[in-house]
Amino acid sequence: MDEADTLSSALLEALPYINYFAGKTLVIKVGGSTLGSGDTTLQDIVWLKSLGIEPVIVHGGGADINLWLKRLGVEPRFVQGLRVTDEPTMEVVRMVLVGKVNTELISAINALGGRALGISGLDGGLIQAEIEDPQLGLVGRITAINLELLNTIVGAGYIVVIAPIGTGPAGQPLNLNADTVAGEIARTLRAEKLIVLSDVAGILDSNGQLLSHISAAQAQELIQSQAVSGGMIPKVRACLQALEGVKRTHIIDGRVPHALIRELFTDRGVGTMITQVVPNGLAPSKNIEYLLDSMKDKRGGAK
């Protein structure tokens, strides 16, 4: 197959997906572990926007926070293995997430031809939160998302980039888990998809094999059996949370070049899809017929 045939085949495979996703909102969670030199994630996001898709980005920044806590001599404290976010720590968290990571992402997206706007949960009361556990200090649990504000920014044509800091009951900043923020944003927006980029292949079974498509119940079982553990737990829980308002959620390998494009516009995908159920008769992988059935339902008036 020559280059022209390869290009034609790729376009023919992608066209049904491009038409389907046009005008829809995708919430994409990115982390520092997948945004190294040569990464294509931000370029993919700019391309999605150019195709009429609305990407909403939530970012983490744990590695940068740890680096700056060390540089500034802020000693970490832990309660039962969980980091305590006291006021000095929160000051560094806010400085790094809002002042460094968020602004760097905005600059990078704009340099690639996008039009990005950075915001944190403090701005306009975007994310309301309460203190999750007094022993952990300024760590928050989300109580509300300002949907009107979010829709206004997205509707203005920006690629929205959200730093995971919430507004506490007294107006104080609260540290939030970025995966949880992405899940709640997706659920509130009733986005078409939540896509969580990770630095692993996706969700693995107890034998270390990639699971391409699982149900919400199967995901819960994997957590309970400890086949899913560590940093993957909040990612899976964010997907389960999002499924209250989102049809499909994904945990994909952000190390793969153009992982977003491959996941969205090909029938193969690069990670794990989690849905409420896995329809009968489908192989446990992404399947074009599943998407086309959804398109047919939509034309018939299904919500």
Image (tube, grey):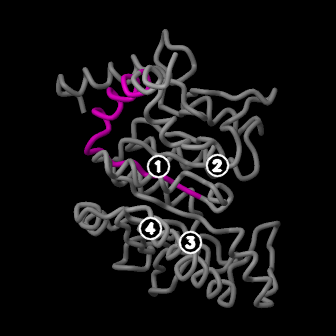
N-term-proximal mark, 3 vs 2: 3
Residue that appears at 55% across and 51% down: 40
Nearer the camera: disc 4 or disc 1: 4
Q: Secondary structure at mark 3?
A: strand
Q: Position of residue 150 (x, y in %)?
A: 31, 65
Give me the disc on residue 198: 2
Where does the magenta region start and end? 9-30
Q: Secondary structure at mark 4?
A: helix
Mark 1 → mark 2, Cα distance in angstroms: 16 Å
Query: Badge 2 local density, few (<14 within 10 Å), some, or many (20+)?
Result: many
In the rendered view, tell whether residue 205 sits above or below residue 296. below
Q: Position of residue 2 (x, y in %)?
A: 50, 20
Query: Badge 4 local density, few (<14 within 10 Å), some, or many (20+)?
Result: few
Amino acid type of disc 1? Answer: Asp
Nearer the camera: disc 3 or disc 2: 2
Q: Are marks 4 and 1 in contact (CB under 8 Å)?
A: no
